[in-house]
Amino acid sequence: MFRKFCLTLSLMAFTIQAQEIPDYKGDYTFTNSRFSMDGIRELITDDNGFRVLKFNAKFAMGKINIQSNFIEKNGKLIPEKYTVGVRWTVLKDTRTLSFDSKKNELTAFGKYEWTQKLPENATVFDPLNVQIEIRKNVINNVQEFSMLMPNLKTGAIERNSYRLIEDETFEVAGKIYLCKVVERVRSQEDRTTRYFLAAELNHLIIKVEDQDKDGDTMLEMTKLY
């Protein structure tokens, strides 16, 4: 009886964890030292439980589409594919990461091409779906954590470390949100990234600041649907 009770609680916990990041859609502005663009970020779940997190934006004479396909099983995120498509005038640039769980391999196509073995018993995230896991850690009040991500140029699997720092506020469409702030420091790249998660919005990431040797980059939500 006790074992059955514990099993039931475990299954409930997995279900709650799998459902704690709801779908959303919002307008976001991306800005760096060279250009800015407005686009839509949204998280979509289909009837079979497959999830897509994407950002589609337009800028002068061009557009960019970034998409992460993944599933969540027993509360665990399982990456499947990450794609980036950029078009500027007549130029095109497409990059893809394909996660093969059967072969336990990660393969890159496009500008950079490589194949890398995935570590056993560990999840390797892509640049988009990693933000889902950041939200889960903050919801669970984890103060410091780390996650594995590939170096997009070389395929090397690198550990990224994150920590909660002092709360800040950020205004969206005239409303001020109190945010948990997560900081990631990549000393090997002299790069610092800060994620602003609005507690009132299920810890949705409404602002991202990125600072490195090439300048500052900002992603800011301007409207939530």
Image (spheres, rainbow, N blue to C red):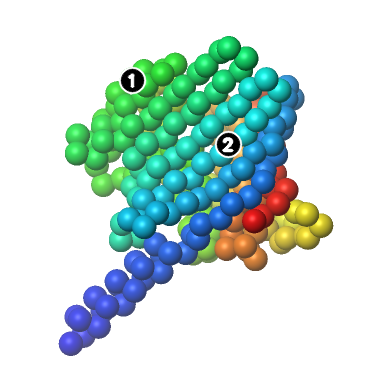
Q: Nearer the viewer, mark 1 or mark 2?
A: 2
Q: Is residue 219 above or below residue 8?
A: above
The foreground one among 185 and 48 is 48
x 81%, y 57%: residue: 174
Secondary structure of residue under mark 1: strand
Residue 101, position as x, y percentages in the image: 24, 40
Q: Is residue 120 above or below residue 48?
A: above
Sort mark 2 into few (<14), some (14-19) or many (20+) by Cα contacts within 10 Å.
some
Residue 189, position as x, y percentages in the image: 56, 26
Residue 192, position as x, y percentages in the image: 62, 36
x 29%, y 71%: residue: 11
**Which residue corresponds to mark 2?**
56
Residue furthest top in the image = 90
Q: Is residue 76 above or below residue 63?
A: below
The foreground one among 149 and 108 is 108
x 50%, y 60%: residue: 22
Left or right of residue 92: residue 1: left
Left or right of residue 2: residue 97: right
Compute the Cα span from label 1 to label 2: 26 Å
Please give the count of numbered marks on the rendered protein.
2
Q: Quadrant of residue 167?
A: bottom right
Secondary structure of residue under mark 2: strand
Residue furthest right in the image = 174
x 71%, y 61%: residue: 178
**Which residue corresponds to mark 1?**
114
Nearer-N-terminus badge (1/2)? 2
Instruction: Tell me the kind of residue under disc 2.
Output: Asn
For the N terminus, which image quadrant? Answer: bottom left
Specify whether residue 128 is in view: yes
Left or right of residue 163: residue 176: right
